[in-house]
Amino acid sequence: LAKTRGRNSIHYFTENMSTDFLKRMELIDDLRTAVEQKQFHLVYQPIVDLHTHRIAKAEALIRWQHPQKGLISPMEFIPIAEEIGLIVEISEWIFTQVSQQVHEWRQRHCADLSISINTSPVQYRNEGKLVKAWADSLLAQGIPYEAISIEITEHLLMDNQVEVVEALETLRQQGITISIDDFGTGYCSFSYLKNFAFDYLKIDQSFVQNMSIDNNDAALCEAIIMMAGKLNMQVIAEGIETEEQKQLLIDAGCTLGQGYLLAKPLSVMDFEQLLIKQNQSGSTT
Ligand code: C2E
Ligand code: MG
Ligand code: MG
Ligand code: MG
């Protein structure tokens, strides 16, 4: 009867593990169903010119509406989809959706619109065959390459340098622009900047959001903006939530921004309304 504390904690630990394990198995199962039943949709968050508030870019963000559990965050299911390889199928679906959508919007509302897609390391395996096929697909559909932009994170470059860089280089030569996402949160940020020319550098929201309260964050933002300029990259500041942050970024020389202050991620219909409004008035927000 007298259990030791040690045995109790082991018992507790294994019980917890098995609930985590079961939850994970369930999520994997649900994800497979989600792909089959197309439970995903995309929202589009405007990337705007900080001076004029004009939209010429947007980022596509995936949403999973689970029939019982409601909306599940991509932060929760993308890592699992990456682990089990399902991200490949999901990403192909995203590419098809985005390419059709951007084509339509360019023709009807905004001729220079470009939409960025987040990509995962798995998609760059086999010499990046999958992402390279995107360029062919755009060509076949008569969609200009500059209509699509690809976002990668620093982690992606760390994992598999040569293969990834080579694939991105090919795409970039064809005219698909490349953004480095969540800049400043990964490791070894400088060596790859030396070897590869990105079109856009997205300053992570954690720096932007502390700009007005932390001098170090403000200094880092200013330095990143200056560095990017010297390397011929355009900067996009992520996660702008206040007027003060926006003004500090403008003062530091940043021209493009994304964040709740400017616009939230929008449904297809709401994004289209914004484009229509922009055409009527010249600016949106
Ligand atoms: P991310 O690519 O850095 O995307 C930006 C995230 O910041 C989005 O969260 C967006 O909704 C959020 N955000 C935008 N403005 C603000 C703001 O002003 N304040 C705050 N607090 N947040 C803001 P979301 O949509 O939940 O996506 C989270 C992450 O999930 C993304 O980070 C990206 O890494 C991943 N993800 C989302 N969609 C996709 C996708 O289609 N494919 C892949 N592979 N990953 C995706
Ligand atoms: Mg992104
Ligand atoms: Mg980001
Ligand atoms: Mg992020």
Image: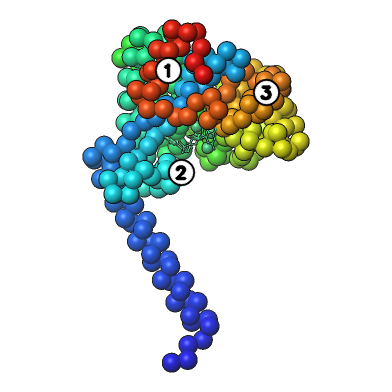
216 left or right, relative to 142: right
153 vs 8, nearest the viewer: 8
Marks 2 and 1, how far apart in space?
Answer: 27 Å
At 37% across and 56% down in the image, what residue appears?
Answer: 24
49 left or right, relative to 44: right
Question: Looking at the picture, how far across and down is residue 254, in whole percent?
Answer: 65, 20
Q: Is mark 2 within 8 Å of ligand 1?
A: yes
Counting other residues with Cα less than 10 Å from the Cα at mark 3, is it few (<14), some (14-19), or many (20 or more)? some
44 vs 28, nearest the viewer: 44
Q: Is mark 3 within 8 Å of ligand 1?
A: no
Tag 1: amino acid: Leu
User: Which sits earlier in the primary sequence, circle 3 or circle 2?
Assistant: 2
At 32% across and 25% down in the image, what residue appears?
Answer: 96
Question: Looking at the picture, how far across and down is residue 284, in whole percent?
Answer: 49, 15
Quadrant hosting residue 227: top right
Q: Mark 2 = which residue?
A: 75
Describe the element under mark 1 as helix, strand or loop: helix
Counting other residues with Cα less than 10 Å from the Cα at mark 2, is it few (<14), some (14-19), or many (20 or more)? few
Question: Looking at the picture, how far across and down is residue 102, in whole percent?
Answer: 38, 18
Which numbered disc, 3 or 2, marks the residue closer to the eye? 3
Residue 33's place in the image compared with 154, above or below, is below
User: Residue 274: which disc?
Assistant: 1
Counting other residues with Cα less than 10 Å from the Cα at mark 1, is it few (<14), some (14-19), or many (20 or more)? some
Q: Is residue 173 visible?
A: no
User: Which sits earlier in the primary sequence, circle 1 or circle 3?
Assistant: 3
Q: How was this image coloured? A: rainbow
Q: Mark 3 = which residue?
A: 247
242 left or right, relative to 54: right
147 left or right, relative to 93: right
Q: Say whether marks 1 and 3 touch (CB < 8 Å).
A: no
